[in-house]
Amino acid sequence: MNMKKAILLFPLLVLLSTWLVNSDSVWKYLFFLRLPILVGLFLLFFPKLAKDWLPAILKNIFVLRDKWQLATVIVSAIGSGTSVILVASTILDNAAARFTLRATIKIPEIWQYGIGILLSLYICIVAIDLSQEKLSKSEIQWGASVGALLSVILLFIISLLRHWLSSNTFLKKIFFDILYLVIKNDSNGYINLQTGELTAGHLTAIAFLIIAGAIYITIGLRFDPKPQSNRPEAPALLYVLLIASMMVIIFGGVTFYLDYFRIPVLILFTVFSALSYLAFDVNHVYQLNPLKNSADKKKVDDKSDNFKQVLTQRLKHQQGENTLVIICASGGGIQAAGWTVEVLAGLQELLGKSFTKAIGLISSVSGGSVGSMYYLDHFNKDGFLEEEKQTQKGITNNSFSAATRDSLDAVGWGFAYLDIWRFIGFPFLIRPKFDRGTAVEIDWQAELKEPRNSKTLASWRKQIFDGEIPIPVFNATLVENGWRFLITPMTFGEVPEKKYIDFNNLYGKLDYDMNVVTAARLSATFPYVSPICRSNLNIKDKNYHVADGGYFDNSGFITAAEWLDAHLNEWLKPENKSENQPHNSLNIKRVLILQINPFPESPPIKKVRGDGGWFMATIGPLLAVFKVRDSVLASRNAQEAEFLAAKWHNKVDIQYFPIFFPSFSDTPQASEVTAFYKNGQYQPPLSWKLTDKEKQAIKDGWTAIKIGETIQNIKQLWHNTWKM
């Protein structure tokens, strides 16, 4: 039996041995111990869940950047294990007196330390294992040693504080007064009436909570997100463990008190949380700003729906018969963001600047919107991608590095220091307009070329009319009616029959503006990572909540196809136009639609075992969402593209190419591809964190497909057939 299985089986062996010794009380103790048992099981099975069961979503939370992150995770893991066993030991010591049970179960102090370490050990093992690609052997040894040393120091400080509190008469009186106020005449399980002292465990729990609170506040202030690139960040795993430590202490104390009165804690907590949301009108919000007139911004006016003028300016470098390129960037977390910019940058390198300058529209969703944002952020005034390979400090600064920068730590900070206080019923303790969604926005803002200079839809609108960038559309979903919400500087309209409305019709004509990082965040409101939210302004009949665009269409194709179909007739060559149409056209003769898909094309599965019933009952619905939305949409989009091309046959040449992230077995051999990708070790993640190997795998994916059939067909079409 290996170490991991032994760690997982240890709690079961302890429970079995306890039950054999005293089966009469074991079920009652299991009830009173339900919270530390649940948190203990979480500590044991969370690494397994992350590494083996849901690696695409959770695995990278265990991949740490440096030795200090490893050291802090080890400390927090041991602290979490210690908090669990501390609460369990306190309940076992005092439950007999408080609940009149027959047996008293005591855990020796040395056993408490041992069990606490065992509870944390699997987390430490998985963190060390998965961090090996980033950390050297010496860094891992340093991080593990320092983490263990800091853990010993932490436990020693807690012990010192406990003894100091015990000997401090003034503080002891305060604790006793508070306890008497709460427990009144029922002191059983709290105070030893013979000695007048707190019973076993309570003072240690108070000391632990004080130390944990001090650490919590320090970390929160130290790692408060700022729009500054390469700033220090605490790992998301640290926030998870810190929350587990504090919650088991706080709610363990609450359950120990309320169980005496037979009050169901979970129901009470749920009602309290719901009432606090109602009483304080709690809502997650995104920021709308009054439009400021300046030289680098353009106000919404009657020309904001003049796509012909915009495309004329955008395609002015072409002569004669014009070619329009439309990009559809699918969603899929940070994988989609990285793949989007890698493909578009690679196509510019392969096809030339004329390709990028021919892009008239980018319709993106979720992670594709984040990639599109950074892609457009690196455009120059001549209308194509121009990236700096290195900054003055030698740090890579390009669209790919910006799009693949870890955002999971910002999510962890936002949840631990903002949203958890909303959830547990104390929203008045935090800033109402700040949550994990705005923390992610600050994180993304830091990776823009000019992080101190906020780009907005209005400033992009001016760039669009100047021909510097194509028209961006960040597709989101309005929760209340299920419509598509097109967040874009241009005016697409409000079309009830097609179930969409754009930003200008909802807010822009009221002279409101929005930062582009906010627009990308709303499109990428990935479930539970970023909260569904509404605007910060109380605008009558317009307080919609906005969710991820993938709920409606995860590809962005519908918006692009409808836009093209609605306006193409006015852009055609004069001889291809209807008789009643004016002849001052764009002379659009060719349209190239590229669908960027961040995951491999799903192969047909012929052998299905049909097992895993419990897994499918619990995780199956989430798995189905991820499996269906890409494969089904890809097939549907291909059909829609065929219908569109057939409709405009003999008037305009419409070519559609889906560009999938490849599985290596489907692509030609490429010597530049790393073994990590060749060996099939790369499983595209669905989270907001990529490891270095996964970033390289995205680059390897492009290296593999650029010599493949799809990209070579595009190259042939662009350079030979269309002669661009």
Image (cartoon, rainbow, N blue to C red):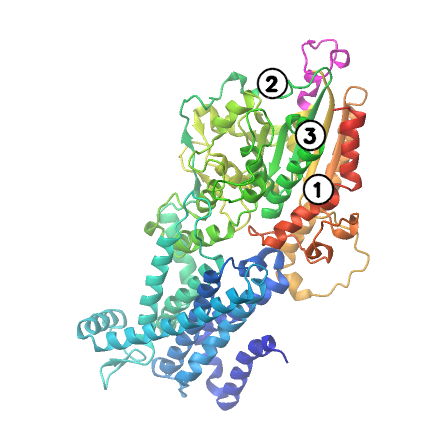
Q: Give the structural element (helix, strand or loop) at label 1.
A: helix
Left or right, 28 with reference to 554: left
Q: Earlier in the sequence, mark 3 or mark 1?
A: 3
Which residue lies under the disc numbered 2? 313
Image position of 53 with respect to 654: above or below: below
Q: What is the count of numbered marks?
A: 3
Amino acid beneath label 2: Gln
Q: Amino acid at mark 1?
A: Leu
Question: Which label lies toward us, 3 or 2?
Answer: 3
Residue 356 at x, y percent in the picture: 65, 29
Q: Which of the two discs, 1 and 2, sits closer to the camera?
A: 2
Is 575 part of what is drawn in magenta? yes
Instruction: Determine crowd level at label 1: few under 14, some 14-19, many 20+ residues with C-alpha closer than 10 A.
Output: some
C-alpha distance separating marks 1 and 2: 33 Å
286 sits to left or right of 358: left
At 45% across and 48% down in the image, what residue appears? 436
Mark 3 secondary-structure assignment? loop
Q: CA distance from mark 3 to mark 1?
A: 30 Å
Which residue of the protein is positioned furthest toward the left in this rendering?
A: 170
Which residue lies under the disc numbered 3?
Answer: 352
Start-end of magenta stretch: 566-586
Q: Are marks 3 and 1 in contact (CB under 8 Å)?
A: no
Residue 633's disc is 1
**10 Å crowding of disc 3: few (<14), some (14-19), many (20+):** some
Which is more toward the observer, 498 or 629?
629
Q: Examine the rendering and report whether any part of residue 604 can be seen.
A: yes
Name the front one of labels 3 and 1.
3
